[in-house]
Amino acid sequence: MKKFWTLIMLPVFMIACKTNEVKDKAFTLHGEIDADAAGYIYMFKREKGQFITLDSTTVENREFTFKGEIDYPQFTYLKLSDSPEYISLFLEPGNINIVINLQDQSNPLVSGSKSHDIYKTYQDDVFVFDKTLQGIYTEYREAASVPDNEARIALIEKQYDSVEQLKNDYIIRYITENVNSPVSAFIALRNIYILDYEQLEKISSGISPDLKTSTYVKDLNDRIEKLRNVQIGMKAPDFTMNDTTDTPVALSSLLGKYMLIDFWASWCGPCRHENPNVVAAFQKYKDKGFDILGVSLDRDREKWIEAIHADNLTWHHVSDLAYWNNEAAQLYSVSAIPSNVLLDPQGIIIARNITGDDLQNKLAEIFE
């Protein structure tokens, strides 16, 4: 009798477990709009730079409801059919409410999502830093318009750098303090350009094993793996890309000299500002065994070639015109430009992201 009872209860228990599992993934997002709005509201996620539609529903009497299932907290976008603006929130299992102000859609009131609370605190704090930086930049522009004002400009630049460093320190601290939430991986991915390999490794190691299959954690670990392969002392990954005449050029075919792989683009202001420094380095050391391979993240062929001539970049150039999806940039985990990697004649990475005086000093150390 006891055995028979166990056999009856086992399927019931399994069904109960399955029901709980589905319930744990279920979400209900109820929305209210503060003014009349008709038509549909759409739900999106963003993947590889593209908006992907997840669902849609009608707005009735200024209200709407989405229901579904979700494995992990996900940064989600909403968009009213008659509005060009996107409304963002962190969606997660549970009952979530959102109140949308049509005059300020970028700041919805969200309740019921712990992940959104974590992200909103981060957003609000970073906004304070950004507002301060914007004020300093306004001062800089005013100072730059006054002749012979170098001392004042230098002081403002120092102030800007100091606040920017405080902002970066805050972001890194906030990420490490919230590693038990996928939000930390999301924030890390959004600020990948300020995080070095060691910091990313530390963040990844602190994330709970329960979150390893979260999209943001997986993407973060993928980025770390790519960075691991392009650290100083590693053999530079080979790639082949077309030059300005559509002729394939392999990195390996250019080895034998000290080689700077320079990631840039015609549309990148800081890159164009750095180009004269790179030109000076090339002119000084090209006859001593120094070469450059420019990898452009352009998507407009004419503007790419025009910038090469305008900036007098007389070295090798390649591009697949794929913008941020440039194959070589992905391979070298480039998340901001200008960016570069310096190789020795055997193709071993000996320096990364050296610009300005750092580039000149490194080359002087090698050749002089």
Image: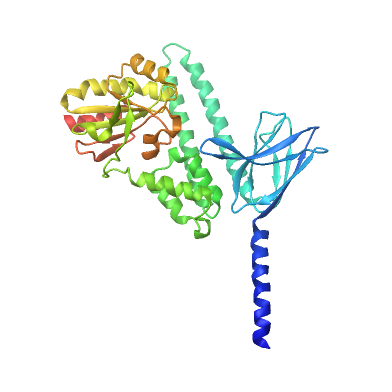
The residue positioned 70% from the left and 29% from the top of the image is 83
The residue most toward the right is 61
Q: Nearer the viewer, residue 39 or 34?
A: 39
Count of marks, rendered view: 0
- Provide residue 226's location: percent of width, then percent of height: 38, 45
Lateral position of residue 239 relative to residue 322, left or right: left
Vertical placement of residue 128 versus 266, above or below: below
Q: Quadrant of residue 51?
A: top right
Q: Quadrant of the C terminus?
A: top left
Q: Quadrant of residue 2?
A: bottom right
- Provide residue 225's location: percent of width, then percent of height: 38, 48
- Provide residue 263's location: percent of width, then percent of height: 36, 30
Q: Quadrant of the N terminus?
A: bottom right
Vertical placement of residue 145 versus 197, above or below: above
Look at the image and name its color scheme. Answer: rainbow
Lateral position of residue 288 relative to residue 318, left or right: left
The residue most toward the bottom is 1
Q: Nearer the viewer, residue 62 or 50?
A: 50
Lateral position of residue 84 relative to residue 352, left or right: right
Vertical placement of residue 329 versus 119, above or below: above
- Provide residue 121's location: percent of width, then percent of height: 61, 44
Lateral position of residue 165 relative to residue 131, left or right: left
Q: Nearer the viewer, residue 345 or 274?
A: 345
Q: Is residue 174 visible?
A: no
Q: Nearer the viewer, residue 299 or 211?
A: 299
The residue positioned 66% from the left and 50% from the top of the image is 113
Q: Is residue 71 visible?
A: yes
